[in-house]
Image (cartoon, helix red, strand yellow):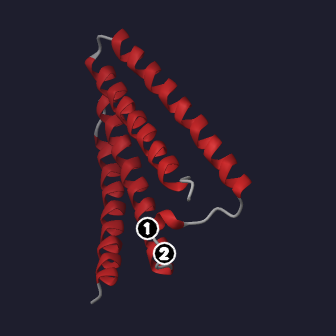
């Protein structure tokens, strides 16, 4: 079996697992009554669904093309610049959101609320980094 075929099979298996995790966590949500625990389990459920969706997207890309994933071409220079500008605006929004959540964390003494807000802060920080990676890899100017 080729390396690409093995990768496709592994990803397909992971999609099934992520979907099973989502269903399993949904059942847990019906049994747990703590507000903080329910919010964390809800996050886990959404993450599993998100992971399944990302993995499905990867399958779609690698199953239909041998072109590396960063090599997708935007159809025009203007479209490329508009997309880059919008991504950079979103980077600013993510940074502002991260700063706001950090202030919220400092304003609470409730450990459950602090834990949940820290999860949001971690996500916002990761989003900021991901958007930066997209801009840096998708919008390079070739010599």
Q: Are marks 1 and 2 in contact (CB under 8 Å)?
A: no
- Quadrant in the picture for the N terminus: bottom left
Q: Nearer the viewer, residue 107 or 83?
A: 83
Query: 70 above or below 139?
Result: below
Image coordinates of residue 73 in percent, x first then y, are: 60, 65
Q: Is residue 79 left or right of residue 18?
A: right
Q: Quadrant of residue 104?
A: top left
Image coordinates of residue 114 in percent, x first then y, are: 31, 21
Image coordinates of residue 53 in percent, x first then y, are: 45, 60
- For mark 2, what is the residue? 67
> What secondary structure is marked by label 1?
helix
Q: Quadrant of residue 124?
A: top left
- For mark 1, what is the residue? 58
Image coordinates of residue 32 in percent, x first then y, are: 28, 38
Q: Residue placed at 33% from the left, 60% from the top?
A: 18
> What secondary structure is marked by label 2?
loop
């Amino acid at each position: 079996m080729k390396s690409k075929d093995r990768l496709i099979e592994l990803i397909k298996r992971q999609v099934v697992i992520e979907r099973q995790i989502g269903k399993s966590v949904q059942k847990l949500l019906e049994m747990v009554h703590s507000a903080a625990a329910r919010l964390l389990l809800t996050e886990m459920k959404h993450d599993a669904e998100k992971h399944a969706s990302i993995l499905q997207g990867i399958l779609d890309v690698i199953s239909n093309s041998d072109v590396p994933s960063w090599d997708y071409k935007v159809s025009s220079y203007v479209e490329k610049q508009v997309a880059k500008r919008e991504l950079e605006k979103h980077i600013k929004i993510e940074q502002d959101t991260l700063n706001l959540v950090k202030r919220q964390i400092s304003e609470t003494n409730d450990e459950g609320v602090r834990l949940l807000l820290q999860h949001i802060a971690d996500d916002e920080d990761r989003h900021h980094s991901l958007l930066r990676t997209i801009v840096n890899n998708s919008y390079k100017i070739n010599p």
